[in-house]
Amino acid sequence: MTDLLHYEFMRNALMAAVLVGVACGIVGTLIVVRRIVFIAGGIAHAAFGGIGLGYLLGVDPVLTAIPFSILSAAAVGTVGRRDRAGEEAAIGIMWALGMALGVLFIELAPGYAPDLFGFLFGSIIAVPFSDVIVMLCLDAVIIALVLLFYKELLATSFDEEFARLRGIPVRAIRLLVLCLVALSIIVLVRVAGIILVIALLTIPTVIVRQFTLRLDRLILWSTAVAVVLTVAGLLVSAIVDIASGATIVLVLVAAYAISMLVRWLFSLCRRSERSRP
């Protein structure tokens, strides 16, 4: 297995896997506890418009997807802030608009887009070192923002009405979370692609949430679980020579199934102890 590290693309892939785990653990926790996974799906598909724009302009699609995703998150947070129905409508519109613009831009772009399937379904093996640097910078921004606004994020994660009574700007914090989702999607899109990105954002936190509900522990353990499982999926895909993004998601799902089994066994043992005379 150490022979794999002799290849530059594998070293880039491992670094990307670790950076993906960090984004998953932090931002995934925030969207799972707030139950806004559907919003993440909308922003992920809206990012396809930015990727198409990158192809049309002849620049790195990752760079053009960053402002596109953030603007999509801001639009969802602003247009749909009045009620849940308005927010869901805004998500659906941005979802469809992003995909439509992406298809249109790619069709207008000259030549063939060889990396397109990598953005749709993920290809961590093809991550260049320049993308690793971009992912590192985005992770640093995510960590800095979460540390800076941790108290506000904690207060608004479980009871927005209570947080509003305490004078916390709930709408601004919600918009901040949506922007963090947008940044994390850019980090994840190379690994799992737009289609599978939701799995990476949700499964690590869902696994950990079965054993703790404290936000700080959720973030730390979700990050650790995401890093380990993403690296494990990458190594399995490299050894078996199968699609990396799909393999990582399958490893995550398998880990979730195992965690459910462990949880069930713990519950069974507790019931057995309580029933003893």
Image (spheres, grey):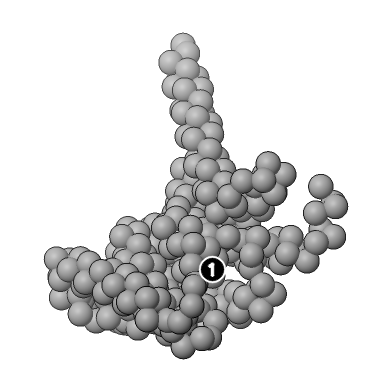
Task: Give percent across and percent down for residue 80.
Answer: 20, 75
Q: Extreme bottom residue here?
A: 57
Q: Extreme top residue here?
A: 277
Task: Give percent across and percent down for residue 15.
Answer: 70, 65
Residue type highlighted by circle 1: Asp
Task: Give percent across and percent down for residue 199.
Answer: 45, 53
- Which residue does the image show at 46% across and 11% down from the upper left? 277
Q: Nearer the viewer, residue 92 or 143?
A: 92
| Residue, disc 1 | 115
- Which residue does the image show at 53% across and 34% down from the upper left? 258
Direction from residue 85 to residue 197 in the image, left or right: right
Is residue 215 among the parts visible in the rendering?
no
Q: Nearer the viewer, residue 164 or 37?
A: 37
- Which residue does the image show at 51% across and 26% down from the upper left? 265
Is residue 272 among the parts visible in the rendering?
yes
Total marks drawn?
1
Task: Give percent across and percent down for residue 13.
Answer: 68, 62
- Which residue does the image show at 85% across and 60% down from the upper left? 6
Direction from residue 86 to residue 13 in the image, left or right: right
- Residue 90: quarter of image: bottom left
Q: Crowding at label 1, few (<14), some or many (≥20) Cα neighbours within 10 Å?
A: some
Q: Is residue 55 above or below residue 14?
A: below
Q: Secondary structure at mark 1?
A: loop
Q: Nearer the viewer, residue 261 or 60?
A: 60
Direction from residue 69 to residue 118 in the image, left or right: right
Q: Is residue 88 above or below residue 231?
A: below
